[in-house]
Amino acid sequence: MIKICAISDLHGNLDVNINQSDVLCICGDIVPLHKQSSSKDSLKWLETDFLPWCEKQPCNEILLIAGNHDFVFERRCDEARELFKGTKVRYLQDEAYFYIKEDGSSINFYGTPWCHQFGDWAFMGYSDEKLSEIYLKMPDDVDVLLTHDCPYGACDVLLQDVWWANGDHIGGKGLATAIEIKEPKLNLTGHLHSTNKLGEKLGNTFVCNVSVLNEHYKLAYEPHYFIMNDDRTFEMVKN
């Protein structure tokens, strides 16, 4: 049995309480809003604030992907990766990671930061067709897919009463296509802050939005926890 904690969209807010887990998954948009446009300031924040916070978390490893506000990973990725060497943080950018627990149980992760186009942000600029090609690079046996974007049709309707919420599905169609083909067991997403936190099915994949902030960038939601059973099925647990 492997326990996963999942969060997203910190935007610099590190006042998040994490319970004991094997792996902590962070699905992008970690850099503070007031630092995101400066790679120098972002790198300094990663080193002096984010990494010390990560090292204190009660988990064996932390898997991190970037989000559309995390320009530093698009512009100076090598320098960011260098900061993570020798720490419990592993940055995934269109990469797989195979986690093995001491008892021999294992889990296959894959992480990707790309989002469908809606503005001039990081990790955007491709058509749905091109994004589908990028996402389809994931292996066929992925247990947990970390994406910043939400797939079209699952956990992609804003529920908070804000003027930009129109009740429509606004997720990525290229991501939805790739998920329906590759069928990862669990897709952890962020990007949209106030969608259904209980999760929804997209084909054979369970999708769950794990943002901890609401649409006003205020801490509003608890971290999500999942257990992978011995038969490689997942269940959401309270803590």
Image: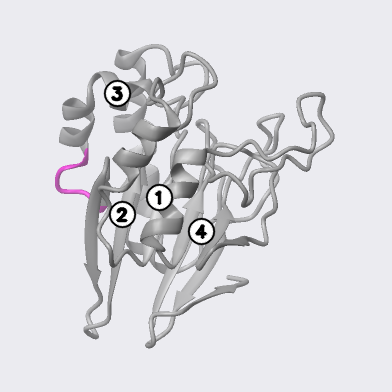
N-term-proximal mark, 4 vs 1: 4
**Magenta highlight range:** 84-88
Residue corresponding to mark 2 = 110
Q: Is 180 situated above or below 172?
A: below
Q: Judge depth for marks 4 and 1 and give the one in front.
A: 1
Q: Secondary structure at mark 3?
A: helix
Q: Residue at x 78, y 43 (%)?
A: 159
* Nearer the observer, 121 or 20: 121
Residue 97's image quarter? bottom left
* Nearer the observer, 224 or 204: 204
Tell me how far mark 1 sits from mark 3, CA to CA: 22 Å
N-term-proximal mark, 3 vs 4: 4
Q: Is 85 situated above or below 236?
A: above
Q: Position of residue 24 (x, y in %)?
A: 40, 58
Amino acid beneath label 2: Tyr
Q: Are marks 4 and 2 in contact (CB under 8 Å)?
A: no
Left or right position of 20 against 97: right
Residue corresponding to mark 3 = 74
Q: Residue at x 51, y 44 (%)?
A: 8
Tell me how far mark 4 sits from mark 2, CA to CA: 22 Å
Amino acid beneath label 1: Ala
Tell me how far mark 1 sits from mark 2, CA to CA: 13 Å
**Residue 85 belongs to the span the image colors magenta:** yes
Residue corresponding to mark 4 = 18
Q: Residue at x 73, y 39 (%)?
A: 158
Q: Secondary structure at mark 2?
A: strand
Tell me how far mark 3 sits from mark 4, CA to CA: 27 Å
Residue corresponding to mark 1 = 178
The C terminus lies in quadrant: bottom right
Query: From where the camera sits, is residue 114 visible?
Result: no
Tell me how far mark 4 sits from mark 1, CA to CA: 31 Å
